[in-house]
Image: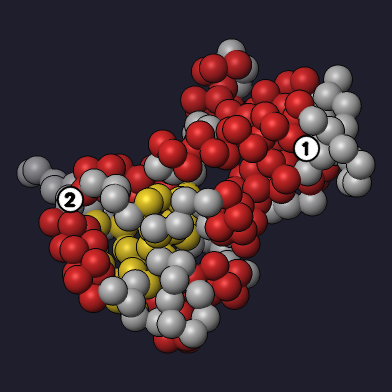
Amino acid sequence: MSTTKKTVSIGVAIVEDDIPAREILAGWIRDAEGFKVVGEYTDAETAVAELPQIKPSVVLFDINLPGINGIECVRRLKPRLPETQFLMVTVYGDANHIFEALAVGASGYLLKQTRRAELIEALRDVHAGGSPMSSQIARKVVQSFRRNESHPSGGEQVELSQREGEVLELLARGYLYKEIAEQLKISVQTVNTYIRRIYEKLHVRSRAQAVAKYAHLPMGTIH
């Protein structure tokens, strides 16, 4: 007697006030294997009220929404939905928007010109624990990371070991824990240990917050 393996669908909600853009995103997701659209919203206020009951796996957020913007909405929702991944899809490619979104709990950041295949791959990536970013965004994150590392200044100092710095830079580039382990030739368990120490030193609770905070901090000594 043969058994059929049940496919688990990844529930995705969309918060986007541009109706044509939202319909395109919803259509792409519905047509992709392993996904389902569990909610569509035109404003942040409705999303804040309803998403905690739905508990989607991933939420796609525009930033420029009427009323409360997408970044503020993520800030309000993240404590209520700690297991949900928030992925920004926006026209804003400047560093301020990028790091503000990551700091409040977004796990990834895509520009609106992202193609269908890239979006679906980003949804799979963020659901698996990654931090997908459009290539232009990833470059800005890494550039900011290196700029602050090269030009320390006064203010809060953060002391990371050489290995912790390497792990955090790979996090900033969007590597998964397994990929970091392979890159540094260490075990995934060791990667988790380093990341736990990094979180403690930066006083953060997520990889996106760690990347955002580290990119803005003047660096102390890296041993």
Residue 92, quarter of picture? bottom left
Q: Where's residue 28, x and y in %?
A: 18, 57
Q: Give the residue at x 43% y 82%.
A: 66
Q: Please tell me which residue lies in front, 36 or 213.
A: 213
For residue 46, side relative to residue 112 (left or right): right
How far across and how far down the image is residue 99, in percent?
A: 61, 52
Q: Secondary structure at mark 1?
A: helix
Earlier along the polypeptide chain: callout 2 or callout 1?
Answer: 2
The tag on residue 141 is none
Instruction: Please name the residue shown 78% across and 43% down the image.
Output: 217
Q: Residues within 10 Å of mark 1 (few under 14, many from 20)?
A: some
Quarter of the C terminus within the rendering: top right
Q: Relative to 208, is 27 above or below? A: below
Tell me the crowding category of disc 2: few under 14, some 14 to 19, or many 20 or more residues within 10 angstroms, Cα based: few
Which residue is found at the position 58% from the left and 49% from the top?
Answer: 95
For the point 49% across and 85% down, the residue is: 67
Q: CA distance from mark 2 to mark 1?
A: 37 Å
- The residue wearing badge 1 is 197
Kindly indicate whether the residue at mark 1 contacts the one at mark 2 (C-beta within 8 angstroms): no
Q: Point out which mark residue 33 bears.
A: 2
Three-letter amino acid code at disc 1?
Arg
Percent coordinates x, y for residue 65 in the rendering: 43, 76
